[in-house]
Amino acid sequence: MSSTPSPRFRRPAPLFAARAEEIPGAPDPQLATDLGHESARALLDGVYRSTDPAVVERVLHLVETEGLDDLASLWSGSPAETLPGALWRLYVLHTWAQRNAHDVVRRYREGTHTIPGLRYLAGVAEPPDIDQVRATLDEILRGAFTGDLPIALGRAGAVAVLCAHGTAHLADREQTPELQHAMTTQASRLLSTGEELTEAARMAEAGTLS
């Protein structure tokens, strides 16, 4: 057994805090952009090169331990066609599925009636249930950091698009105008997220996602 220690996991939040202290006054937009790209690449490369399974699990539960706000400060302002922007959308989708799995299952099932073929790309076992949806999003997020980024982004995009179509169907059945409007808005946002993740997957496959 090798005595070489596994690479130490470095979370992105301290990187932002350390660099942000160097900025007098309001953060410079370009520096904020650089921080987002640097932290996303450092996190992705650090996990990919690690031989310690615990490192992957820490990244999987990064939102639970550090909070979504920490990632938002780094990545939420990044365009979808960048690595930090794609990872941000992936983490948001994963967090939604973990916290609201029942709702995700309901919307996903509705969506498969419209575009059933897309469920094969999403890779959710049929018929989907709460445990399966959570496990699938765990698998997708884990895959993004273990060498299958294009596949992970593509699967996440398929899940989001299916949920978008399902949400639109459910909105049509709502009798309350306020709820119907809210769900229609959610469907539009989910569709945008799905399309963005799908495009990010294409760029990752081509080696142009940075």
Image (cartoon, helix red, strand yellow):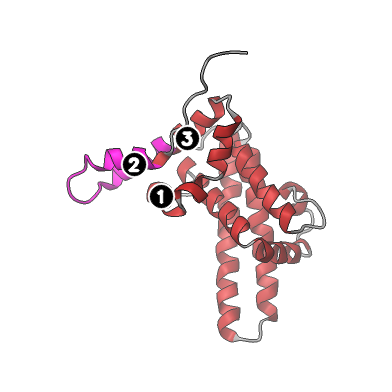
**Residue at image x 23%, y 42%?**
21
Which quarter shows the N terminus?
A: top right
Residue 47 in the image: state x and y as whole percent. Answer: 53, 31
Q: Secondary structure at mark 3?
A: helix
Label whose residue precedes the other's in the sequence (3 or 2): 2
Label whose residue precedes the other's in the sequence (2 or 1): 2
**Residue at image x 59%, y 52%?**
94
Mark linked to residue 70: 1
**Residue at image x 28%, y 38%?**
19
The boundaries of the magenta stretch are 13-39
Q: Nearer the viewer, residue 208 or 106?
A: 106
Residue 57 in the image: state x and y as whole percent. Answer: 58, 38
| Residue 78 in sight here | no
Residue that carries the numbered disc 3 in the rendered image: 43
Quadrant of res 23: top left
CA separation in Å, label 2 and label 1: 9 Å
Residue 193 in the image: state x and y as whole percent. Answer: 56, 56
| Residue 123 in sight here | yes
